[in-house]
Image (cartoon, rainbow, N blue to C red):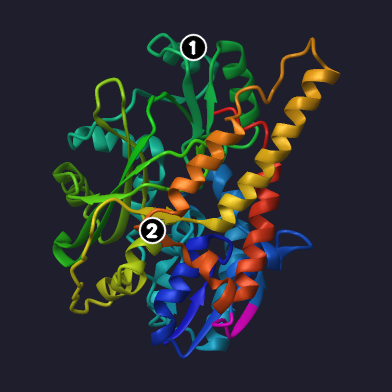
Amino acid sequence: MNLLIPDSQGPQSYYVILGMKSVCRKIIVTVPHVGKFSRIYSSSSNSKYVTKNYSVTGINDAWFKNGCTEKATALEENFLAEILHICKREKITVIYPSSDAMVSFFSKHNHHFSERSITIPVPHYSIVRSTMNKYTITTMAAQAGIDIPQTFLLADESSLEKALSHLRFPVLVKPCFGTVAQNIYKINNKEKLYSRFNALKLKTDNLMVQEFIPGNKFISDHVLTANNYNLALSYKLQSEEPALKIWQNNGSDHNHLSIAHVDPNVFMLLKKLHYKGFANVQFKIDERDHREKLIDFNPRINLMAWIMMSYGINVPYVNYQIFQDQRITVKSIRYKGAMNTLQPIRDLSIFLVYLWCVVMKICHRYIFPAKKNPFKNIPSFMHIIMFHKKRYFSKFKRIDPLSTCVFTDPCVALCYSLFYFWHTCSKYPDDFQA
């Protein structure tokens, strides 16, 4: 097959390349226009497995602002024309999107490609619209018997005032359409909530507010459903949030992992949606009542696909087989207990910024003693060292491919390191105090 990867920025696009490379004659990657350092931002485009790169129009920002719309915008029409030209020139047979914006786009315009005999392993657009809208999927999950945090749609300040009559601080304010925990804010008081609400309203009209769920334990259900919505593969990953955070999310994703059975209510939700393909349903365990509560739904290959790939389950290829109506065989997992999943590139980037925060905390204490120290809540240095020592010297561990490829695919590792360090620096210290 001739494979096109239309979103080379996210780590999951590299996992797709690793999963599909053995059955591909050539792999083509598109790089969006995002400035001078587009190729660095699109780390997967630098892989040795990639045959050729094309520069294309970027549509991620427009998707974030408008969400999943029915009518194609002028920007989408331009992007579609570019992709169709690439498909014709390179004789593309499979397009494999793995980011929210691209899954939404290619699901929406799938008919243009199916009539050209090009396979795109994504769900139907009506399903994508429902699952990517965080407010809609939260409502549907509640109807399927899944526990959810209290959630309110925000149209204007009056709806925000009404929501606050039902909620207690802290709360989370977030866009209905978003990705990788960007623009999700934990708010501790009313004044800051209104300020953040007005700032986000300039970026998108689709906003919601939720109760904050206390706790540091997370659940991630991974499900692959085949024809007639029958279960093809399912596994549950349980993890604990690390001590050091980034983007008000996990600093080192899923550091302590165990595998269990998926909640039957998740299957009920997928059947109600008529879902086909790979789905990732994320929960947080509420420390107040110890119940799993929905926090996200991803209708795509996600950042944790590499964990099952490390066990020999080729998630990207199995997902492709489902959309090709092929027979699926999945090997059983030999699992020996709790496991630490390590991401050295991310850990090192965050640790370097942490050291900078420590220095700034000390400087702020002596230079501006009368002002509130924005770095006062950072963990102690010894706590961070012991935390990483326990993980990296554990008996059972897995290291993500974006770190191990420093030897096998060094350009990818280098570009991802530079990008992740820059992105980390751009987010601290504002999002550090989660």
Residue tagged by mark 2? 397
Is 285 contained in the magenta span?
no
Q: Quadrant of the C terminus?
A: top right
Q: Quadrant of residue 88?
A: bottom right
* Image mark for residue 71: none
Assign a secondary structure to mark 1: helix
Magenta residues, start to end? 48-53
Q: CA distance from mark 1 to mark 2?
A: 47 Å
Q: In the rendered image of this protein, does residue 72 appear above or below residue 56?
A: above
Residue in the foreground of this view, choosing between 426 and 395: 395
What secondary structure predominates along the stretch shown in magenta? loop
Identify residue for label 1: 161
The image position of residue 282, as x and y in percent, is: 34, 43
* Identity, as a three-letter code, of the amino acid under mark 1: Glu
In this rendering, is residue 65 above or below 145? below
Residue 371 x, y percent position in the rendering: 77, 13
Left or right: 218 in relation to 378: left
Residue drawn at x 46%, y 14% is 169
Looking at the image, which residue sits at the far right?
A: 367
The quarter holding residue 364 reads top right
